[in-house]
Image: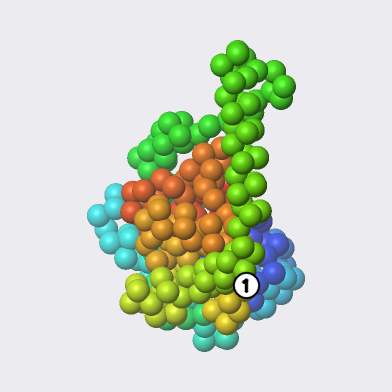
Amino acid sequence: MPFEIIRQDITNMKTDAIVNPTNNELKPTGGVCGAIFEKAGYEILEKKCKKIGYLETTEAVITKGYNLDCKYIIHTVGPVWRDGKNNESTLLYNTYINCLKLAKSKKCNSIAFPLISSGNFGYPKDKALDIATNAIKNFLLENDMLIYLVVFDRESFKINKDLFDSITQYIDDNYVEFNKYKFRRNTPESLDDLSISILENVNRKSSIYKIESVDKNLLDALSKAEDTFSQYLLKLIDSSGMTDAQVYKKANIDRRLFSKIRNNKDYTPSKPTVLSLAIALELNLDKTNDLLRKAGFALSHSNKFDIIIEYFISNQIYDIYKINETLFSFDQNILRT
């Protein structure tokens, strides 16, 4: 997938480039910057940074990765948070864009970012996250690159409190323990339950008999007449008026995977891929469930991941980046394709 949020030590990332959030003098500090200097080779990196000299806020420069598992380190200076009224959001947005443009000029296929300015520079984490994902999303509309947003722990990553509280309430209202609907075999609670059980068994056998009596040729014909997942998806794309590129970019899906789905009518993707496509096409809940059924899946209220997805679709919020941020915040798997 083109953009992914992961919990990891950024110094262990095996990407073409990693981003070092530094200060105007490029001096090693604590946090992410200090860890990058230490692992890359403190003396050699410090010597190189001294040669570069001064770096303006939003500016980005590049050095070798030295002892890191990356080719390059992109050094950049994000804005210091003051009160949100000093152009901080534009400065932070441009910081990400300048890093991405520099990576592209060096023909990098992959890059890893920390959440810039959210540490010592005091930028509120939820606001910093919104700007990071917005900049990355806009860059990916016109470019192909694997971009990782790397956070060290859960405390390093926060979504908007109102959204978090709203989804927490939605989960509380809709989550159903799976065991709640398990029943004990051969132990009817009452005579009425036993009667219902007998009737259901009779009806089931009757249905089986009817199905077996249907002409097999008719069943085969009906089976062939039904669209496969791929065929149904392509019809939805055609009716949406979107291009293929618009769909797979909005779904945060790799172009090669989308090509596989398009060109192989019998290909069945994973559930996260199906949901990503449903979100990209802005399907309502009924159509999302139809698309899921074509691939052999369904949403369940005994699964918090599914409930969070349902929340966004029900509220017509079709931003896959925001959805993945939320899934990550709730310790759920993201829509990884």
Q: Tell me which residue sits at (37%, 38%) in the image.
A: 166
Q: Nearer the viewer, residue 217 or 275?
A: 217
227 to 6, vertically: above or below? below
Q: Mark 1 points at which residue?
A: 267
Q: Which of 203 and 123 is in front in this view?
A: 203
- The residue furthest right is 67
233 to 162, vertically: above or below? below
Crowdedness of circle 1 by 10 Å Cα count: few (<14), some, many (20+)?
few
Q: Tell me which residue sits at (58%, 77%) in the image.
A: 265
Point out the image quarter for the C terminus: bottom right
Say left or right for 94 vs 217: left
Point out the image quarter for the N terminus: bottom right
The colour scheme applied to this rendered structure is rainbow
Q: Tell me which residue sits at (64%, 46%) in the image.
A: 208
Q: Position of residue 110 (x, y in %)?
A: 60, 75
Hey, what amino acid is under mark 1? Tyr
- Callout 1 secondary element: loop
User: Total marks drawn?
Assistant: 1
Q: Where is residue 57 in the image (x, y as percent from the top left)?
A: 40, 68
The answer to whether any part of residue 274 appears in the image is: yes
The answer to whether any part of residue 21 appears in the image is: no
Q: Where is residue 270 in the image (x, y as percent from the top left)?
A: 61, 62
Q: Nearer the viewer, residue 88 or 164?
A: 164
